[in-house]
Amino acid sequence: MTIQRRPRPQRRRRLTALLLAAAIPWLAAVTAASDTGRAALGAIGRQGALALDIFRGQLLDGREEDALPAAVSLAIGQSPVLLAGREEVLDLRRSQEEDGPGGQEAQEEQVPITETPEEPAAPLVFADNGVTARTLVPTSTEGYIVAGDVYITNTSDNTFDASLFDGAFAARLPEEEGPQVLIVHTHGSEAYTMPPGEAYEASGECRTTDCAYNVVRVGDELAAALEEAGLSVLHDATLHDYPQYSGAYDRSLATIERYLEQYPTISFVLDIHRDAISDGEGNMYKVVSNVAGLNAAQMTFVIGTDGGGLEHPHWRENLKLAAAVQQNLLDDYPSLMRPITVRNSRYNQHATAGSLLVEMGAAGNSLDEALLSARLLGQALAETILSHQG
C-alpha cells in the first residue's frame, strides 16, 4: 500500500507565522537609523518599494497578475524557506481576492512613492565550508522496502513489507494541557564543519561542548519551528556523551524517563543527532538537498526494534510515524530525506509510540545547512501530527 497524501489544514497558519517572523527583523533594521516616526515610515516605504521591484523582476518575471503587497513580497525575499513556498503564497493571495467582495477593485488605490536609488541588500547565502557536497538518493528499488515515495532499509532481524504503511500511526497529542514533545540529544556534542572564520572550540573530532555549534543548537531550531506550529515543546540540552561517550544511551534514557514521569502529557520524543559519512578513501563529504537555491542537510530517520533482544512494543508505530513524516517532507522536497534505516538496537524508542531518532546531516555539513533542515522538519512533523488528531 502507498502512503496517502493528506490535505494540509495548517498551511495558512504556517505561512502567516513565517511571514511575520521574516518581516519583524526587517522592520527593525530599516528603521534603526530613524529619529522620528515620519522618518521611520519613509524608510519603510523606500525599502518596501525597492524590495517589491526586485521580487517582481527576479521571481515573478514581471507578471502583474502575480503581484503581492510590498510587505508580503519583502518578507518572502528575506527567507529562503518562504521563497520555496512562493507559489503557495500566491495561491493563497489569489483565493482571498476571489472570495473577497469586489476582488481586485475593492483594494485601495496605491499612491506612488518617490524612491531614492539604493543598492539592494545581499541575498541570504550560506558560507562554503569547503567540504565536497553530494546528494544521496536511491537509484533503484532493489534492497529497499518502498511505500509511496519512502524508501526503507531494513537491517534488523524483523520482517515487514509495504502493507504496513497506510499513513496512519498510533501516537496522538494528549487531551490534557501540558508539554507534548520532548527533544533530547544522546550525543549532544556532535557538531559540524564550520566555514573559515567560524571555528568553535573542539572537544573531539567534529565535536564541541559549545551548544551554540553542536546538535543542541539544531534542537533549538527544531523546537522553535514546532512551537510556531502550536505544539508545546521541552528541549533538554544535556550532553549525555560528555565527558564519557560510553553509556550515553543509558544516560539519555534516564533523562527521558524523568521527563515522562514529570510530564505524562509528552507523546513524542525526538533524539537529534548528526551522521558521519566518508567515501571509500576516508574523505569526509556532506549530504545536501537544494531548497530555494540553498543547501539543506539531508536527514535520516533511524528506527530501532526489538531485534537485539530488548523489549520494544512500539517499534512498528515509531516506523509508521517516521514514514508518514517522511512522505510529508518528500511531497515538497523530493531529495531532502535519505532512506529510513531500521536496526536491531532500540535507541530508547521504546519510551513512547511517538519516538524518533533523526540524523541531521553529517559531520561534513555546515551548521547553517542543518538549521535549515531543522526548520523544514519541524513544520512537516507538526503538520503530520496535527492532521492525525481525532
Image (spheres, rainbow, N blue to C red):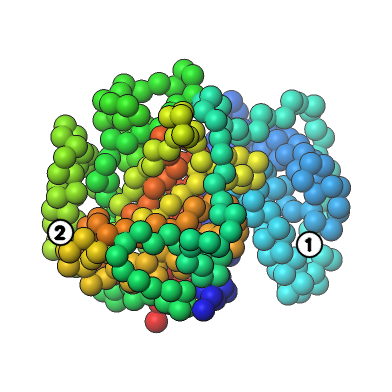
**Which numbered circle lies on residue 107?**
1
Q: Amino acid at mark 1?
A: Gln
Crowding at mark 2 (Cα within 10 Å: few <14, some 14-19, many 20+): some
Say if 197 sits above or below 163 in the image: above
* Residue sitting nearer the eye, 34 or 326: 326
* Residue sitting nearer the eye, 231 or 307: 307
Q: Position of residue 266 (x, y in %)?
A: 25, 65
SS class, disc 2 = helix
**Which numbered circle lies on residue 257?**
2
In this picture, residue 241 sits left or right of residue 5: left
* Residue sitting nearer the eye, 204 or 35: 204
| Res 268 visible | no
In this picture, residue 304 sits left or right of residue 105: left
Mark 2 or mark 1: which comes first in sequence? 1
Q: Amino acid at mark 2?
A: Glu
Q: Position of residue 164 (x, y in %)?
A: 42, 77
Residue at the spot 17% in from the left edge and 64% down from the top edge? 309
Residue at the spot 73% in from the left edge and 74% down from the top edge? 99
Q: Position of residue 66 (x, y in %)?
A: 80, 56
Q: Nearer the viewer, mark 2 or mark 1?
A: 2
In this picture, residue 47 sits left or right of residue 218: right
Residue at the spot 28% in from the left edge and 35% down from the top edge? 189
| Res 147 visible | yes
Residue at the spot 48% in from the left edge and 62% down from the top edge? 144
Crowding at mark 1 (Cα within 10 Å: few <14, some 14-19, many 20+): few
Say if 1 sits above or below 66 in the image: below
* Residue sitting nearer the eye, 102 or 283: 283
State the separation of the CA atoms marked 2 and 1: 56 Å
Say if 52 sits above or below 19 in the image: above
Report the number of numbered marks. Answer: 2
SS class, disc 1 = loop
